[in-house]
Amino acid sequence: MKAEIISIGTELLLGEITDTNSAYLAGQLPLLGLDLHFISTVGDNQQRLIDTLRHAWQRSDIIITTGGLGPTQDDVTREAIAEFLGEKITIDQDLVKKFEELFSYYKIAMPPSNIKQAAIIPSAEIIQNPRGTAPGWWIERDNRIVITMPGPPREMQLMWTKEILPRLQQKIVGAVIISKTLKLFGLTEAEVDDKASLFLSATNPTLATYAKSDGIYLRITAKANTESEAQQLIIQREADIRAILSDYIWGVNSDTLEHNVGALLVAKGLSLATMESYTGGLLANTITNIPGSSRYFKGGLIAYTDDARAAFGFDWQLISQCGLISAKAAETMATMAREKLGASIGAGLTGVMGPAEVEGKPVGTIFVGIDDGQYSQSFTKNYPGNRLQVKQRAVTSALFELRKTLLQEGNDAPDS
């Protein structure tokens, strides 16, 4: 069966918000064996939405809309569907009563405009919204299913998992399509493609590579009659890929490097401190994006200017001999961070972020230093790009090298 998603909202077209709903649903539909062929975005315009629905009706079996179910005048999803299907809208008084009870519970006067959200057409069944006042619709007509859901992701996702997904599972019997994404760092997309070329021409499972800010993703997609059969195909192909690329694979699916590094630090009873120069604290910021990171992260020092480096006691003779953009400087920063903050491991990060070269080194030159108290080491990389891209890749490189170092650390390493 063919599925289509229609995301509704002028704010999406203006770039004011990102359409995360379509991405979420695109990951859910294959689990039902549904082939997603189209994703459309349309503004809050009734006629344009009707035109979009007409195209979807001609080419898809299941049409899912998100957005446009609010109480304001520019929320026109219900009106557009009713006009397209030639059905009359009425107000469900039971829903109105529920709205009034909800507003009364929170001691808020219900605006009259909220009555609009109780609209219904004869072919639609109300889908309850546990997190908001915008119910959805489930419509079955002419061998098609139309599903409307609210735009706020928090509301949409709960409605999907609690109400929509179980109904679709009962309706659909067919092949299951599942995917697993392997995340790699240290190779270009072309290099990954070349090393995995033996499997790229396979039809089931299929492989696809694409570049992201934290490396290269390799997506394995399998199709089978049951989820367990599809999972087995994924497992077999993943083993094939890991035999070739294991040194570069750092995670799967929703993993992040900062989470993986934090989990390793906790598991080994170790702590971490950082010192950065021209990344300006982005490494420390990324590490602390993980809740509970205070258990293992001692803190970060930002040696961004000469005054800051002087305050930290940086060796000026070393800078004059090796430069701040050097392997020795990165190792020294790692040692200083570890010693000053009393951590088990220190990480130093320096490089040329752009827009111009520094110390004769081109933009994108990165040095990562790691000191675990027994020995220090450094890693050199070059990542062309604009300033923000280089900063992000520098942080990713530091986390990747930290992960490798932690995997080699003894399980009984003491915390400082």
Image (cartoon, rainbow, N blue to C red):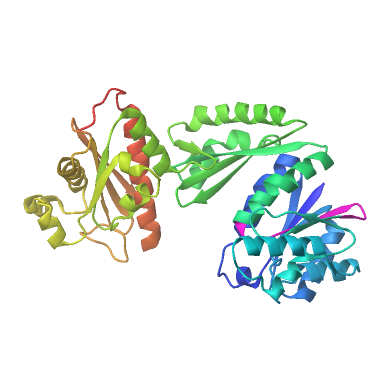
Q: Is residue 22 visible?
A: yes
Which residue is found at the position 60% from the left and 68% from the top? 108
**Which residue is rendered at x = 66% and y = 30% of the image?**
231
Left or right, 190 with respect to 268, comes to right
Q: Farthest left residue?
A: 317
Residue at 76% x, 68% y is: 77
Q: Is residue 24 above or below residue 77?
A: above
Q: Give how far across and how far down residue 162 sits, in percent.
A: 70, 45
Q: Is residue 238 above or below residue 301?
A: above
The C terminus sits in image quarter = top left
Residue 132 lies, in percent from the top left, at 65, 59
- Write the start and end of the magenta stretch as one range: 140-153
Residue 151 in sight from this viewpoint: no
Q: Work out whether 124 lies above or below 44.
A: above
Q: Nearer the viewer, residue 257 or 363?
A: 257
Can you give x and y, in whole percent of width and height, for residue 37 in the image? 75, 53
Q: Please identify the quarter of the rendering in which residue 150 is found.
A: bottom right
Q: Is residue 105 left or right of residue 98?
A: left
Position of residue 315 measured from the top left corner of the image (x, y, whole percent): 8, 50
Q: Determine whether 330 is above or below 243 in the image.
A: below
Question: Which residue is painted at 33% across and 45% down in the image?
Answer: 398
> Residue 415: within the magenta?
no
> How many numbered marks appear?
0
